């Protein structure tokens, strides 16, 4: 079904409504919600394989699923009644969030008044709720946490109380519908908000003890690996029927292409093996009790490296495919654009190599990035 909607996903810059509804009705946005809400609370190794499989059909679809699913782990940190109202009692409950705290939440009796324009809200076209990320202001000044940092919160707002803005005009991951939204002096009750960082856990499951940034990274890496595998499979079909201009024999008969595909397979298999092995190790450690900084560093570098190797694989395929791959509607072109948008995302930053290198060399780092 996802494959059949490929062109419409690209053209409309969002998941077609019948596809979104099918995914939601199948429970695919609720895979990691707590069992206390009647959801699977899926283990991380299984979750990553699900996202990888969806990405083999379409990267945008898998990206939307990952962003909505991992943000839903906040359900483990808010009162059960509120979590149920947002994700379960709301038909096809999905929350579209935003990374940066560019909104302001003014403390008022009973809650907050939130105002701001928020960017990069993946999947917002079909979400039931928006989650503005806001700096909390009390008596006209920023409220400060005990550690001295400004307090920021996610505040859950029904989509009917937000303004959606058509801003997602991009070349890759077009179908994610990662538009902006705005809220204007919207009242949010106190219990419908959650600290963006270090909110106390109300659920005991091991999944919720893994830093959320690493959960997002795991899914994002799975999207990249799945998309690259799809790209390779498409190329193998092309190579069996295309004869390059001014060359003898099929594309698959060219020694340079053979060598490139050998490297591509090695890189992709290495990326997937590193990702899956590291996810399993993280899961084993967190279920045993404590997730160490060593394992968090290993997880960070594995997810970054998997994304970077996947991009390298797709680049090799794009080059080997020749002019066939340059046209709109060609799946290799689409995947090439998709992975290069992934390359600009925070989870694939080259700076992660420096971060983890510094950690393993015994130098001080910003541990929040792990």
Image (spheres, rainbow, N blue to C red):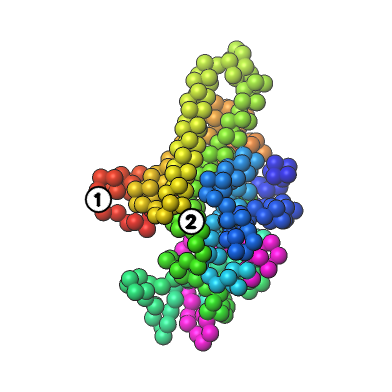
* Closer to viewer: mark 2 or mark 1: 2
Residue 192 lies, in percent from the top left, at 56, 74
Instruction: Identify the mark nearer the N-term, 2 or 1.
Output: 2
Query: Residue at 34% across / 48% down in the picture?
Result: 294
- Image height check: is 257 above or below 83? above
Magenta segment: does it hold 91? yes
Q: Which residue is mark 1?
A: 363
Query: Residue at 52% across / 81% down in the picture?
Result: 111
Residue 78 lies, in percent from the top left, at 53, 70
Residue 191 lies, in percent from the top left, at 54, 77
Crowding at mark 2 (Cα within 10 Å: few <14, some 14-19, many 20+): some
- Could you say which quadrant of the image residue 34 lies in? bottom right
Query: Residue at 54% across / 30% down in the picture?
Result: 317
Give, as a single range, the part of the protein colored magenta.
85-113
Query: Residue at 66% across / 47% down in the picture?
Result: 10
Front residue of this view, candidates 144 and 278: 278
- Image height check: is 193 above or below 334? below
Crowding at mark 1 (Cα within 10 Å: few <14, some 14-19, many 20+): few
Q: Is mark 2 in CB contact (under 8 Å) with mark 1?
A: no
Q: Secondary structure at mark 2?
A: helix
- Image height check: is 118 above or below 254? below
Q: Secondary structure at mark 1?
A: loop
Q: How many marks?
A: 2
Magenta segment: does it hold 363? no
Confirm whether residue 127 shows in the render. Answer: no
Front residue of this view, candidates 278 and 193: 278
Q: Which residue is mark 2?
A: 206
Front residue of this view, candidates 173 and 191: 191
Confirm whether residue 34 shows in the render. Answer: yes
Residue 174 lies, in percent from the top left, at 61, 49
- Image height check: is 66 above or below 142? above
Q: Is residue 13 left or right of residue 353?
A: right
């Amino acid at each position: 079904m996802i494959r059949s909607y490929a062109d419409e996903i690209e053209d409309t810059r969002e998941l077609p409504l019948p596809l979104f509804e099918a995914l939601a009705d199948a429970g695919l946005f609720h895979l990691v919600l707590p069992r206390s809400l009647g959801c699977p609370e899926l283990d991380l190794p299984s979750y990553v394989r699900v996202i990888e499989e969806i990405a083999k059909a379409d990267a945008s679809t898998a990206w939307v699923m990952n962003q909505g699913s991992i943000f839903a782990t906040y359900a483990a940190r808010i009162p059960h009644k509120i979590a149920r109202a947002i994700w379960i009692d709301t038909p096809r409950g999905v929350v579209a969030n935003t990374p940066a705290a560019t909104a302001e939440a003014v403390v008022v009796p009973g809650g907050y008044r939130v105002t701001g324009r928020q960017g990069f809200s993946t999947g917002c076209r079909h979400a039931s709720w928006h989650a503005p990320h806001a700096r909390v202001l009390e008596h006209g000044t920023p409220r400060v946490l005990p550690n001295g940092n400004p307090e920021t919160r996610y505040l859950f707002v029904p989509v009917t109380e937000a303004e959606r803005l058509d801003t997602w005009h991009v070349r890759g991951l077009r179908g994610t519908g990662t538009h902006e939204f705005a809220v204007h002096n919207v009242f949010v009750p106190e219990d419908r908000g959650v600290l963006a960082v270090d909110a106390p856990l109300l659920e005991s499951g091991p999944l919720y003890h893994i830093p959320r940034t690493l959960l997002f990274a795991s899914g994002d890496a799975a999207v990249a690996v799945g998309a690259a595998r799809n790209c390779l499979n498409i190329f193998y079909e092309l190579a069996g029927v295309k004869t390059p201009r001014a060359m003898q024999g099929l594309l698959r008969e060219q020694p340079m292409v053979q060598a490139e595909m050998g490297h591509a397979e090695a890189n992709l298999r290495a990326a997937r093996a590193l990702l899956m092995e590291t996810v399993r190790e993280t899961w084993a450690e967190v279920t045993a009790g404590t997730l160490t900084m060593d394992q968090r560093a290993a997880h960070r570098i594995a997810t970054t490296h998997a994304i970077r190797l996947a991009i390298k694989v797709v680049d090799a395929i794009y080059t080997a495919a020749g002019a066939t791959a340059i046209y709109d509607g060609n799946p290799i072109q689409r995947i090439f654009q998709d992975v290069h948008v992934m390359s600009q995302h925070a989870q694939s930053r080259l700076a992660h190599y420096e971060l983890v290198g510094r950690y393993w060399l015994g130098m001080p780092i910003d541990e929040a990035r792990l």
